Amino acid sequence: MEYVSACAPGKINLALRVGQRRPDGFHDLDTVFEAVDIFDDVQVYAADGLSLSVTGLGADLPTDSSNIVIRAAKLLQERFGVRGGAKIELTKRIPVAGGMAGGSADAAAALTALNELWELGLSASELRALGAELGSDVPFALLGGIAHGTGRGEKLTALRPGALHGWVILANPEGLSTPEVFRAFDRQQYGPECRAQFPGAQNTGADRPADTKELRRAVQGEDLAAVGAQMKNDLLRPALSLRPDLADIFRKIGDEGYGSILSGSGASVAVLVSAQRLHTHTADLRRRFPGLRVFSAAGPAAGAHIKRSR
Ligand code: C5P
């Protein structure tokens, strides 16, 4: 194989319930992931060494071994004694530091493409296990669709989606760092005062069930209002403590669509709308948020997959 291209989707957490910090520093999660049709691409070419170039959003990301794509390639080389290298071209469309797991998607796309380029013959479940070594969200970027995530997010059970979801995503020019948001979570006690403090922020109440059972039921049906009512992100409050300006976004969204949620650890905000009215809602929110990058997406979308090879 001389050349392979693969892509992997961004994600939204329809709910993100965060438990205690574990001895390994991660938090136990109860989450529902949905892959959306915004994909990062990698193209890999057989080469002597390993190299990476990045275009699109985040073109200023590091291209050395601190980049998760290079870490993914090295993991495969070391684990399977791969002698060849690869020239890797990454095209980014998923917002950087936006809580949509763009880095994890890049790792998932790289694992998928290099498995093919280097003819490793790894199965989907073997790739997911390797992905979990790279980051908590990598297994989901490989799987796609809608899934229940537990552990640190790497233990997945696929759910059968009952409807197509439209999403208007409001990406912030300034992202948030996931470890920082988790650290702020640790400093805070989750409580109902969040709603009192930020009245425009939806789905922050302590009146929701403390797990995702109702949401998992709702996503397997057609009623988007039922899905919206169960959306809940425990990282909203710590994210707002770091970025109080996000509260204005929720206030201004008001009751547009079926509900809005901070995506993962932020700073993107996602509004659930019907797929049929996606265009109208996107145009409306784009007008109301001239300072944000407002774009539409649909989910659930496929997980990482090969696009072309030669
Ligand atoms: O696994 P990943 O590299 O994406 O995680 C980034 C950071 O987010 C971790 O270093 C940790 O600080 C935090 N995290 C966490 N609990 C999780 C997932 C991530 O505390 N379940």
Image (cartoon, rainbow, N blue to C red):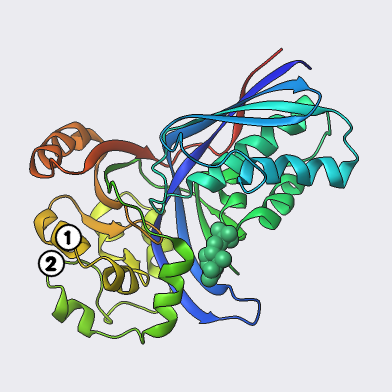
| Residue nearest the viewer, comparing 247 with 244 | 244
Residue 59 horizontal/vertical position (percent): 46, 34
Quadrant occupied by the C terminus: top right
| Viewer can see residue 212 | no
Residue 242 horizontal/vertical position (percent): 30, 69
- Verify CB contact (< 8 Å) between mark 2 and mark 1: yes
Q: Is residue 243 above or below residue 222?
A: below
Q: Residue type at mark 1: give it.
A: Phe
Q: Residue type at mark 2: give it.
A: Gly
| Residue nearest the viewer, comparing 288 with 53 | 53
Q: Earlier in the sequence, mark 2 or mark 1?
A: 2
| Viewer can see residue 94 | yes
Q: Is residue 60 above or below residue 162?
A: above
Q: Which residue is mark 2?
A: 200
Alpha-carbon span between mark 2 and mark 1:
5 Å
Residue 186 horizontal/vertical position (percent): 44, 82
**Residue 59, disc:** none
Corner quadrant of residue 43: top right
With 119 as the anchor, is 202 left or right in this view? left
Corner quadrant of residue 279: top left
Quadrant occupied by the N terminus: top right
Disc tally is 2
Q: Secondary structure at mark 1?
A: helix
| Residue nearest the viewer, comparing 88 with 250 | 88
**Residue 250, disc:** 1
Residue 197 horizontal/vertical position (percent): 15, 79
Write down which quadrant ligand 1 falls in: bottom right
